[in-house]
Image (cartoon, helix red, strand yellow):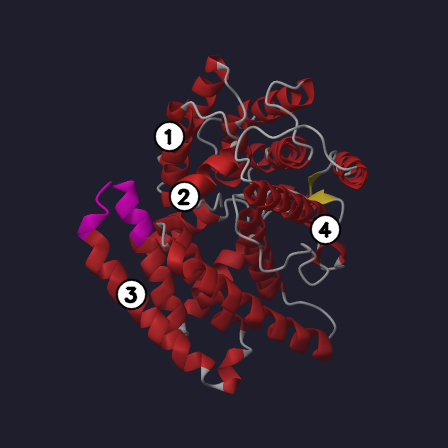
Amino acid sequence: MHHFATQTIRVLFPLAPPIFGQTLVATAVETPHLLYALLAASCSHHARLVQEPSASQLTILKFTDLAVAGLRAALADPAETLKPETAMTAMVLCTNDVCNGNARTWKVHLSGVMQLLTALLERQRATDGGIEPFALCLLKWFATLDILAGLSGTHAGCVNDGQYWNLSRSPDCDIGQVDEICGYSTQLMPLLARIGQLARRNVHEQSILETFTEPSSTISEELTDEAQDIERKVLYIANQSPSAATLASHDEVLASELHNTHLSFIHSALLHLYRRVELLPKSHPKVRSQVAAILDNVQAIRPFSPANVLILWPIFSAGCETDDLHERQAIQIRMVNMQTMGMGNFTRARDALARYWESGASSRWDVYFAQSGLELVLF
């Protein structure tokens, strides 16, 4: 448990409020199923750090089985179902699945978390009108993973409109500032969700027409208008900074890097909008400018900064949309650095990117991976 409290939690959420990690560990000590889930996460992380995943497999499976059994028992008890720690156990198991590449189970756990959170938040708002800080961090954790799942390929997010119980308008959140859990403003969430929706719709329409090739740049007037509206809204929230509380509770340099993680997501949102919604070619100046902007902000983050944990989706997106060898080399170097942090999703993202590069495929990356049957969650 010491490894989780001192290392794993810092890799998962490097800038989360200190109270979140403290409450998580303290709650786990009194909640066996959550404790087992955290121990499974910690063992998995440690095994990847020392590059001996097979040696710890039995221990990881034991803790996972105990966590699942305890979670099932909690779900059978109405008094336990509405506790934040019950939803937290499901969220930890889901995250473990993503980091370990368990594609068959993470969606089940994520859907379960959504149902638990909905019931939990309804009760909290009915009693005192607000959201407890611990539950708020859990909500952001869920939203971050769900949003990125909906943008990483063909999976539709659990909350399709990206509103997440009006999180982006909640007085409990620092509106107009970069969120310390997800690494970007919560105001970006609905826009990211809509971009994912439109991108998946385009792929679906292409599959019906059996034209899995580089698509035409011709789109409907209605879609053009919506894309321009999304672009305007994304640019409107580009200039945001970390909150005073974040700056006060973390190393100043690390906290200031949240500005760059936010901008990385801003430019990634525009990159996906241009490529996957407006269907612009990879060589288009608007596409090239977003790739360059992402990489500029990545380079502004220290090579081994914990903030790199937050930008897997932006750097992977930039990598998929550049043929420039110097840009690819910079991306490869940064992803190697990220891989040393011991998160399995970093390793799979790097391997998938290398596979896409080596294929020389003319099709867009999301189409290529859909055809290949490869599913990623860039969390």
For numbered disc 1, what is the local secondary structure? helix
Q: Nearer the viewer, residue 264 or 18?
A: 264
Q: Give whichever of discs 4 and 2 has the lower sequence position.
A: 4
Label 4 – label 2 distance at C-alpha: 36 Å
Q: Please give the residue where the numbered disc 2 appears in the rendered image.
A: 374
Q: Quadrant of the N terminus?
A: bottom left
Q: Amino acid at mark 4?
A: Asp
Looking at the rendered structure, which numbered label has been put on residue 174? Answer: 4
| Place of residue 206 in the rendered image (x, y in percent of width and height, measured from the top left) | 58, 40
Q: Please give the residue where the numbered disc 1 appears in the rendered image.
A: 355
Q: Give whichever of discs 4 and 3 has the lower sequence position.
A: 3
Label 2 – label 3 distance at C-alpha: 28 Å
| Place of residue 201 in the rendered image (x, y in percent of width and height, measured from the top left) | 63, 46
Does the segment drawn in magenta span residue 282? no
For numbered disc 2, what is the local secondary structure? loop
For numbered disc 4, what is the local secondary structure? loop
